[in-house]
Image (cartoon, coloured by chain):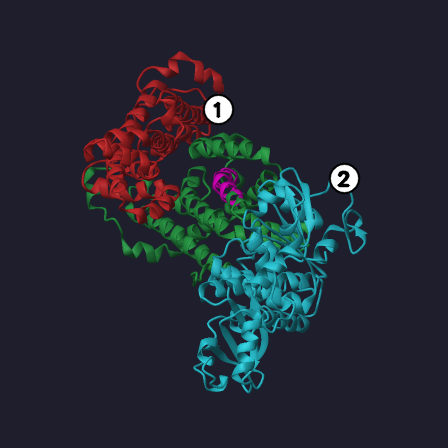
Chain colours: A red, B green, C cyan
Amino acid sequence: MMGPVLGQAAVPRDIGVFEFLFGSEYWTGPGGILASLWDTLVMCSAVMAVATIIAVPLATVLAHHGRGELSITWVVTLSRAVPTFAVAGLLVPISLRRGWGFEPWPIFIALLLLALPPIYLNTYTGVRGIDRGVIDAARGMGLSERSVLLNVELALATSVMLAGIRVAAVQVVATEPIRAFLGGDGLGRYVRDGLGQNNDNLLLAGAILVAGLAALTGTIFGLMRRLLPPGVRRLA
Amino acid sequence: MTPVAQATNPIIRWEWIIDEWDQIREALVQHLELTVLSVALGVVVAAVLSAVALRFRFMVSPITGFTGFLYTIPSVALFGLLVPYFGLSRLTAVLPLAAYTLLILVTNTVAGFNAVPESVRDAAKGMGLTPVRRVVEVELPLALPYIIAGLRIAVVSTAGLVTVAAIIGQGGLGALILDGLQRTFWTPMTIGASLSILLALVLDGAIYALGRWATPWTRRAKAS
Amino acid sequence: MALIGPSGCGKTTTLRMINRLIEPTSGRLEVNGRDVINESLTELRRGIGYVIQQGGLFPHRTVAQNIATVPRTLGWDKSRVADRVAELAELVGLELTMLDRYPDELSGGQQQRIGVARALAADPPVLLMDEPFGAVDPIVRSRLQDELLALQQQLHKTIVFVTHDLEEALKLGDRIALLNVGGILEQYSTPDELLRSPANTFVEQFVGEDRGMKRLALKSVAELPFETGPVIPDTASSSEAVATAEAQGVEWIGLICDDRFGGWVRVADLANGSVPADAERFPPAAQVTPDSTLRNAMELIMTSRTSVAVINDGGHFGGVVSLDAIRRSLVSEPDL
């Protein structure tokens, strides 16, 4: 058993990959593609929102005061090495014993650990990388420290910061499907079901959905960068 | 399963570790094998790609673009995509894991070679070292700290990702996690998860030590 | 030989064509009478020592391994390489304890010495040096220049030396090639000739307004015609002394005792008839050695309120240098 399941869409064994992907009956309804997609998007958005709220202010303030240079080395290593599956695996029993269930805390926290490093790292280096002359000029014009921080440092670091958020978002979306193997659902469920039911086409379709969402996420964040003023964009 | 059963089930039951020691050891060995195989394959492919990128500069961008693209493919999806072709085999696990190492390995190798000071390159040439000797005796050793740094990250992240390979039945410590999950028996889950994290740290330390040994000149501080 | 010129004049390019780090597109370039184009690249380069700015030392090799690079590629046996390394270390003034250290542990000046030792390792007849002292501070730089001159006294290599520093070129070069942007050879001559008769306005501007002073820095006191100056033996009588002083139109006269300079005495002090030996003596304010440059001598004379400097040739009196003699050396140079 795989924990609480939303209700299986009845997928015929001999279904074709495109028949599944383009068949409207598989998109709608409980356990349909749209519901699973929504499930995944809610989880990923929540993770990204919390990660951004934690990492951006922390990194900006530390970088502004020139503190925490050492944290960078650690964060760089961590950013490529968080074993999400293992972390979630450790958290599931703890969560269950406390009566919080399979979802959403274990996977949420594991994904959060994945998302924090790139955002923190890029915000920090973005703020630190700003030409000191610009900041001195801002101070010289009589801007308050608060204003320097928000209107100059953070504004100029936006491009680099956004690049970090993009990396984090792609990683979170790409990793979220393991949730289907940790007692949850989401878009990864079709890969799980395909493997479980030995249905290669369902497996392929599921993999295409997961990969497609990750690619789309990268593209959307890439496009967002184009909305920035050219001077800020160039700083990335 | 009732919530009560879940609540009373302890995080770790020490007797189980003793009883199932063979199973744990087997999972650890499989985990290690998958990690080493994947990174080894990654290193070989990355070496070729890096050599191409360094030899033909215009290839740097396509190669990093391609390896970067591979890196963004979700592991669950990549395993899933390969199963219909290679079955639930070790190859299906190793190919994606190796693919994920390429980005960091190629990036760091190219950066390492690019970081060789122009004056040193020039001196090596000017003293009449053959091209092969220049690469093997001068450029490679100087790029080594960067390559080692990349290798450390590749190994640590691979050791973490190998747990996911359990979903396609390749064993390893991830299999203990899945097993525990399915039986709602937390001991194997806790053991699998902690050992995989521990293994990653040990491997990281080992490569770090290897790197220190291989690059003695980086150990001494500048005297003047 | 020194190659000098403004940036972009191709002095480094010229140097790098000699060992074919840059391939010449046309023309001939001969080393030891053989066109470099016909030589194997590695053979050619191993036969030419090469020293560059910042040394270009291999940071991952110890000092000894750095020096041994070319001998090792030439397949020398271990003991021969070790002997050669020790010999070179001594030659360039490196302590033997430094041989096992890594280049980054040493100072810039030491690194530069290692660079020179490494280039000399296989005893190449030709040495190329590309601004080798460009990255060290002026004091160390001047010392390294002196050491290179001393080294060249022993070794007699053909050295092609690229620099953008005129003083350095004048000091080190037997001949100077002055290049202009675009690789145009403006003048090729000895340092003295470069300063004395610049070939055109470019050369004139490049060497600067004070080329007369610069020439003085090139000449040593020993090069001047011998001049005894207003001196007499300390056994002379006062009338002899006064006569000598009047003949030369000076108010001071030098005493020589036992081939040494015994000090100056005031002619006025001798007027009352006292013997020179008893008169009050003043030690020489300006003293030079035969190796001193004329510029040095002139500076001393100017700042010490005398009109001549006494030459101290290893304790013996070697004559005097007068401002007049220095001036003459600049205007009438018969040879060259």
> Against B195, is A166 above or below?
above
User: Is residue B97 on the magenta stretch?
Assistant: yes
> Against A216, is C120 above or below?
below
User: For mark 1, what is the residue?
Assistant: A201
Q: CA distance from mark 2 to mark 1?
A: 67 Å
Q: How many marks?
A: 2
- Image position, residue B211 (x, y; %): 48, 56
Q: Depth check: give the residue in front, C110 or C241.
A: C241
- Image position, residue B197 (x, y; %): 36, 49
At 31% from the left and 33% from the top, the residue drawn is: A134
Q: Which mark is residue C26?
A: 2
Mark 2 neighbour density, 10 Å: few (under 14) some (14–19) many (20 or more): few
Give the structural element (helix, strand or loop) at label 2: loop
Whether residue B99 is visible: yes
- Image position, residue C248 (x, y; %): 57, 70
Q: Depth check: give the residue in front, A59 or C136.
A: C136
Whether residue A47 is visible: no
Q: Left of B209 or right of it: where is A154?
A: left
Chain of the residue where label 1 is placed in the rendered structure: A
Q: Depth check: give the residue in front, B2 or C183.
A: C183
Which SS does the magenta portion mostly show?
Answer: helix
Q: Give the amino acid type for the residue marked by disc 2 in the picture.
A: Ser
Q: Specify start and end residues of the magenta stretch as a single range.
A: B94-110
Chain of the residue where label 2 is placed in the rendered structure: C
Q: Please identify, in this view, whether the residue under mark 2 or under mark 1 is nearer the observer.
A: 2
Q: Left of A79 or right of it: where is C87?
A: right
Q: Depth check: give the residue in front, B160 or C318.
A: C318
Mark 1 neighbour density, 10 Å: few (under 14) some (14–19) many (20 or more): many
Q: Left of A82 or right of it: where is B130?
A: right
- Image position, residue A98 (x, y; %): 18, 41
User: Is residue C60 on the magenta stretch?
Assistant: no
Quarter of the image where one finds residue C180 = top right
